[in-house]
Amino acid sequence: MLALLSKAKHPAVDWDALSRRILEESAQACWVVDGELVTVAVNPALCALLGYRAGELIGTHLLTYVAEESRSVLERQAAIRDLTAHRSYDVTLIRSDGMPLRVIFNDSRLDGGEVGTAPGFCIFVTDITRRSEEETQRALRVDQLADAVARMNRFLGQICQELKDPLSAILGATQMISSDAALPEPVGAAGQGSAQLGAYAALCSDAGRQMMRTIENLSLWSRLQLNQVPVDLRVYELGGLLQDVLEELEPRARSRDILIVNRIVATPVLGDLSALNTVLKHLIENAVRFSPSGSIVMLSAAPADGRVAVRVQDNGLGIPEELQPHLFRIDPHHAAPGADGEVGSGLGLLICKALVERMGGGIRIFSKPGGGTAVTVTLTQGLRAGL
């Protein structure tokens, strides 16, 4: 009679001995779970990482500590655990204090035990939270750089257009001058040719000044970005500085029948001479550009608490609300035509903001569509001589 051989039995796994050996030999955070992903053992490094005591972790399910968005990852890895003995994947854990941790699970299957029993798993946990944050910040900086480059390209396109328009006017005027000079002057038309040449010359002169102003602004803005504009802070009287600025701008204001009312007299401020002149000129010039014919541009100053608020108010078209957040950005979409149709790049306001901040001040714009615009520059109040 044949003797029936009994089926060989696999020796049972001594989980305690295996866990102690793995945990004692590893200084890395280690998590031992059974086939149902219930915690069997942990080491002190994992407890420190998660902020729990060992007794709190043992006997609990692994998914308890996994963030909601990572649970599908862990469940998918558990579903394929019989296909490969070792797996590596990223998950987000939740610490005891609620803080998320981005980690790498190096998951190895621990085969053994009786036939039909589920194997256990040893998971080495590597904290990559800082690396993940650095990668996120790096991606953000890349996006910001790409956005800055795109805005710069749009801005340069606007500058090119701003230079192209007056240059076209100059070329057109010179072409008309050449054409008129080639024609014989009709009898009895003495003096008409000179008048036409004078009109052409005036057109060329205005276009040339517009180009020169754009080039000067672009050069100054470029030097400001490179921190190549020195600032020498001293006490100056705004009333005196305004006289020189107004003498330069009065002819254009008169040509458009705009009255500039200056209520700023002896007002000492701390600032840089060149920067103050540039800021005042830009703001008053903008107010004149956007004011309708026959209106008033008001200049005023109000000292308070060691500061001086210098205000330039016009009665122009105002600025649409959706454009106001973009006024101090390099963005051609916020440029609007003035009352005479001239379109600016908005570079003047960027220059004003940079110069005012270098003098320790600030700039704000209040505008209402159809109700005019008020630009307020706040500077440090200076002490009068003898005080």
Image (spheres, rainbow, N blue to C red):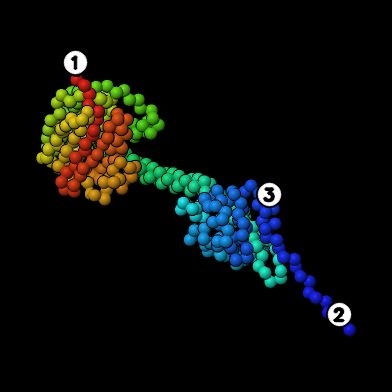
User: Toward the viewer: 142 or 116?
Assistant: 116
Q: Nearer the viewer, mark 1 or mark 3?
A: 3
User: Toward the viewer: 18 or 209?
Assistant: 18
Whole-percent x and y of residue 89?
58, 57
Which residue is the site of mark 3? Answer: 25
Which residue is the site of mark 2? Answer: 3
Query: From this viewpoint, is residue 34 visible?
Result: yes
Residue 338 to residue 228: above or below: below
Q: Nearer the viewer, mark 2 or mark 3?
A: 2
CB under 8 Å between callouts 1 and 2?
no
**How far, Cα to Cα, is label 1 from label 2?**
123 Å
Q: Amino acid at mark 1?
A: Gly
Which residue is the site of mark 1? Answer: 386
**How far, Cα to Cα, is label 2 from label 3?**
46 Å
Q: Quadrant of the C terminus?
A: top left
Q: Is residue 333 left or right of residue 256?
A: right
Q: Amino acid at mark 2?
A: Ala
**Sequence order check, earlier mark of 1 and 3:** 3
Q: Is residue 204 left or right of residue 69?
A: left
Query: Residue 163 is drawn in which quadrant?
Result: top left
User: Toward the viewer: 201 or 155?
Assistant: 155
Q: Quadrant of the N terminus?
A: bottom right
Q: Secondary structure at mark 3?
A: helix
**Sequence order check, earlier mark of 2 and 3:** 2
User: Which residue is painted at 27% across and 21% down in the image?
Assistant: 234
Q: Secondary structure at mark 1?
A: loop
Query: Residue 34 is drawn in which quadrant?
Result: bottom right
User: Toward the viewer: 92 or 177?
Assistant: 92
Query: From this viewpoint, is residue 165 visible?
Result: no
Residue 23 to residue 116: above or below: above
Q: Amino acid at mark 3?
A: Glu
Whole-percent x and y of residue 137?
47, 46
